[in-house]
Amino acid sequence: MPRTMLSKPLWNTLAVFMQQSGLIYHKEEHCLTFEGILYRMRTGCPWRDLPPEFGKWNTVFRRFNEWAKKDIFNLIFKLLSEYSDTEWLFIDGSIVRVHQHSAGAASKENESIGKSRGGRSTKIHLAVDNDGLPVHFELSGGQTHDIVHAESLVSQSPPSDFVIADKGYDSEAFRLTVKQQGATPVIPYKKNCRKADKRVDKCLYRYRHLVENAFARIKHFRAIATRYDKLERNYASMLALGFIIIWLPMWTE
């Protein structure tokens, strides 16, 4: 079996959650379509260059685009992550380069594409659970500071006892928000902070690599490590599909 394809047990698990979504059903042609989308996600090839074994490239893209409009991939991702263990919640942001093919969207919105000295980029804001499994993500332009999406990341994620983040989230307002939601912030202070008590739970903070590992795993997929999609919703759907692939083994015997 090619490494870009799902095994039979994984596909059977995915089919169950497809039906639970209520928006997409287990049909034989959907299996081939999903494999085509997965191939594109893993390799980063243009849609037009999909191998003919997956059917017509425009059929695969059209279905992906329709499913993205209905937010189906994100819905399945939320179903898979519903029972995540979020006693510890780790958050962070990571920048991805935007390819020139992603330019020219027929939209008045910026589609979460930012401009900086390094070029055009998109930032992924991610929250993961105790096991480093993704539970929520958001997109923004690459120049957006991490703290801008911090409160939203925490509020949209399942309740937690501890929220762990790096110095980029050093903000008393954010710490207060975390406490108001019943969690304890584990965020180191910057060197120029004048606060007298700068103590932080170093034993817990050392596990912050879990969110960094999640970024490393998701960026194995070339169409995620580099953004080729013009529309934010399509790139977000591709990202949600990547998280689905990470979650599926957790639900498969």
Image: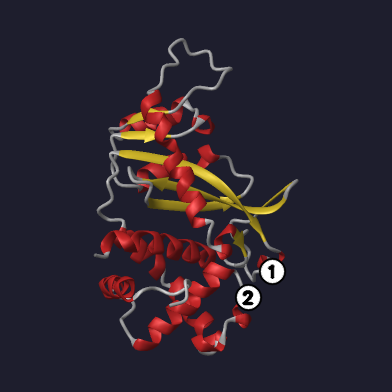
Q: CA distance from mark 1 to mark 2?
A: 9 Å
Q: Could you say where residue 203 lies in the image, as x and y percent from the top left? A: 37, 26
Q: Which mark is residue 101?
A: 1
Of badges 1 and 2, the one in the foreground is: 2
Instruction: Name which quarter of the figure residue 152 lies in.
Output: top left
Q: Amino acid at mark 1?
A: His
| Furthest residue in direction right, as rendered | 117
Tag 1 and tag 2, C-beta contact below 8 Å: yes
Q: Secondary structure at mark 2?
A: loop
Tag of residue 150? none
Count neighbours of disc 2 (C-alpha within 10 A) and say few if under 14, some if 14 to 19, many if 20 or more: some
Horizontally, is 111 left or right of 131 in the view?
right
For the residue marked with disc 2, what is the amino acid?
Pro
User: What residue would you read off at disc 2?
Assistant: 46
Q: Is residue 149 visible?
A: no
Color theme of the render: secondary structure
Quadrant showing the C terminus: bottom left
Question: In the picture, residue 161 is in which quadrant?
Answer: top left
Q: Position of residue 111 (x, y in %)?
A: 59, 60
Name the residue: 41% across, 17% down: 199
Q: Residue at x 27, y 56 (%)?
A: 82
